[in-house]
Amino acid sequence: MKKQSLKKLIQTLVLALGAFLLAFSPLASTLTAHAADNQSSVSAIKKRGYIKIAVFGDLPPYGWVNKDGKRVGYDLYLARRIAKDLGVKAKFVQVNANNRVDTLNSNKADLVLANFTVTPERKQTVDFAKPYMKVSVGVVSKKSDPITKVSQLKGQKLIVNKGTTAEQYFTQHKTGASLLKFDSKTQQFNALKNGRAKALADDNSYLYAWVKNNPKYTVGIKQLGKSSYIAPAVKKGNKSLLNWTNKEITKLNGENFFEKDYNQELKPYFGSEVKASDIILTNQK
């Protein structure tokens, strides 16, 4: 073989090897992830002219569609302010509890504001910004036959929403309850009304709102485990939008925005036993 042909062959092999190593290196994975994240960066959102925000559509008073067909609620009030401060329009993407992470990972949403509780498991798959609410798992049941302690659930059916902290709590703690799981909030509350289970477990903050409209029921167990926190979430590695959102939460706290949000969107739906300080977080830096 001629020297020139051999030299050309070696160069070709070196280039091919380099491409192979790059394709399977951590650097390539990082570059690929960053490329995917760019479409949800602050600059990309501003260039596009709108931010895609994942919200609930059937969870009053946090996120639902009212009789006039308008999306309203505590999370929607925050979502519209975020879009305004970004200088773009808000485009809402309706989600259920169990597809919030997938909605981010598939780039269908830039930000999740769907009553998303921060957990160690979720931190592995999404990046949470600073929290804006606190919450605990509660249990609702009939006033005529109330569940006031977990031991009463042994051997009983308990309704939970898939992908929620309530499902996680009763899966991890062996209470003897048989879990009846549903995809949406509407389905789970209808199931309780239809007598398909003894009780229903979910975030106490909106169980309080639900029982006000359904006075035959009571939140017999107001708190299970430690308090958790509700926060906006972005796709893992999206530092641009994460950093901007953290600054936004700090700024809004300084303006007492969340107290105003509570008074307008939540207070009318809660009973007298619930106070703003039970729900909102203040003085975050």
Image (cartoon, grey):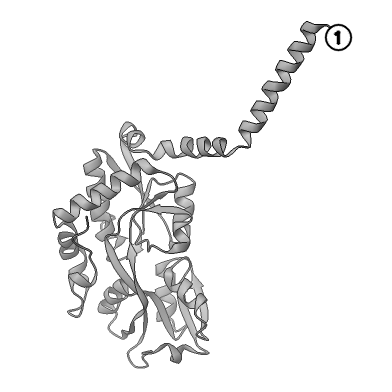
Residue of label 1? 1
| Left or right of 237 in this view: 91 | left
Mark 1 closeness class: few <14, some 14–19, many ≥20 residues within 10 Å: few
Q: Picture coordinates of residue 103 (x, y %)? A: 46, 51
Q: Picture coordinates of residue 170 (x, y %)? A: 48, 78
Using the image as rendered, state which of residue 33 and residue 70 is in the foreground: 33
Q: Picture coordinates of residue 45 (x, y %)? A: 34, 37
Q: Is residue 8 above or below residue 123?
A: above
Q: Residue at x 69, y 24 (%)?
A: 16
Please identify the quadrant where the N terminus is shown: top right
Using the image as rendered, state which of residue 35 and residue 14 is in the foreground: 14
Q: Picture coordinates of residue 220 (x, y %)? A: 33, 86
Q: Residue furthest right?
A: 1
Q: Residue at x 71, y 16 (%)?
A: 11
Q: Residue at x 38, y 62 (%)?
A: 118
Q: Is residue 90 above or below residue 189?
A: above
Q: Residue furthest front?
A: 3
Q: Residue at x 50, y 40 (%)?
A: 33
